[in-house]
């Protein structure tokens, strides 16, 4: 926001001060409204996802993306599409999210996990196993749950139980997201205690 306002003002040097202030205020209000709408749609979509109302969840995530073009929303749209067994849509959303998602995004791990699930469920075994390896390589560095051992065992034996794998990845991703959110918002929780106030994140 600060950068955007500086750009706006840099191009308005010859306009009266009160008009510059008005334009800046409109810009701030517009951005604030955009983020508010995006946040509301994401919040509602996550609630629908938790309630297993996947079609409604996907609709809200796509609305959120149209509002802000944030790839995080596409990651959740892919999650909902996977739950609906709409694998072409799920793979498309994940592919689009990969192009622009930030490495520091809270939802990077979700993207990696669901990419593996989507490819494996779509019977793209080699690609799916490679994606699962990437997920595990990343998750190992994020204070993983002990259930990572079950995923590693499946991969080592090359015997993938999709129902179990989906359950484990869902749990691992949710716990990670909840823990990081709690740490960032309140500086409390497991990560605060274990890391001495530092979150070690590896995209």
Image (spheres, grey):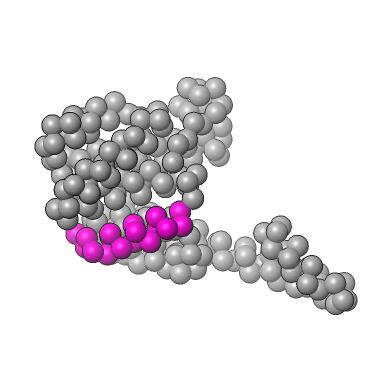
Image coordinates for residue 165, horizontal then vertical, percent: 20, 40
Task: Give 109 or 84, whichever is nearer the viewer.
Answer: 109
Q: Nearer the viewer, residue 124 or 94?
A: 124
Range of magenta residues: 85-101
Q: Which secondary structure dominates the residues rendered in magenta?
A: helix
- Which quadrant of the rendered structure holds the N terminus? bottom right
Where in the figure is residue 11, as x and y percent of width and height? 78, 72
Tell me if residue 51 can be seen: no
- In the image, is residue 56 above or below residue 192? below
| Of residues 182 and 128, the one drawn nearer to the viewer in this rendering | 128
Residue 105 visible to an observer of this rendering: yes
Q: Locate residue 143: give its quadrant.
A: top left
105 relative to 154, above or below: below
Assess whether residue 91 is covered by the magenta stretch. yes
- For the point 24% across and 38% down, which residue is it? 168
State left or right for residue 42 relative to residue 51: right
Query: What quarter of the picture does the C terminus occupy?
Result: top left
Q: Is residue 20 magenta?
A: no
């Amino acid at each position: 926001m600060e950068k955007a306002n500086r750009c706006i003002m840099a191009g308005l040097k010859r306009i009266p001060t009160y008009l510059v202030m008005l334009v800046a205020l409109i810009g701030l209000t517009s951005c604030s409204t955009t983020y508010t709408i995006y946040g509301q749609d994401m919040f509602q979509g996550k609630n629908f996802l938790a309630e297993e109302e996947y079609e409604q969840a996907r609709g809200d995530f796509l609305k959120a993306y149209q509002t802000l073009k944030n790839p995080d929303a596409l990651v959740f749209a892919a999650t909902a599409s996977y739950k609906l067994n709409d694998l072409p849509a799920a793979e498309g959303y994940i592919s689009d999210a990969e192009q622009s998602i930030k490495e520091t995004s809270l939802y990077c791990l979700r993207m990696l996990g669901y990419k593996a699930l989507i490819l494996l469920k779509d019977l793209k075994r080699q690609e799916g196993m490679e994606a699962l390896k990437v997920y595990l390589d990343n998750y190992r560095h994020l204070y993983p749950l002990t259930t990572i051992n079950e995923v590693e065992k499946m991969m080592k034996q090359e015997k993938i139980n999709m129902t179990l794998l989906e359950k484990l990845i869902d749990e691992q991703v949710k716990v990670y997201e909840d823990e990081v959110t709690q740490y960032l918002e309140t500086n409390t929780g497991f990560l605060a205690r274990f890391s001495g106030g530092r979150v070690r994140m590896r995209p």
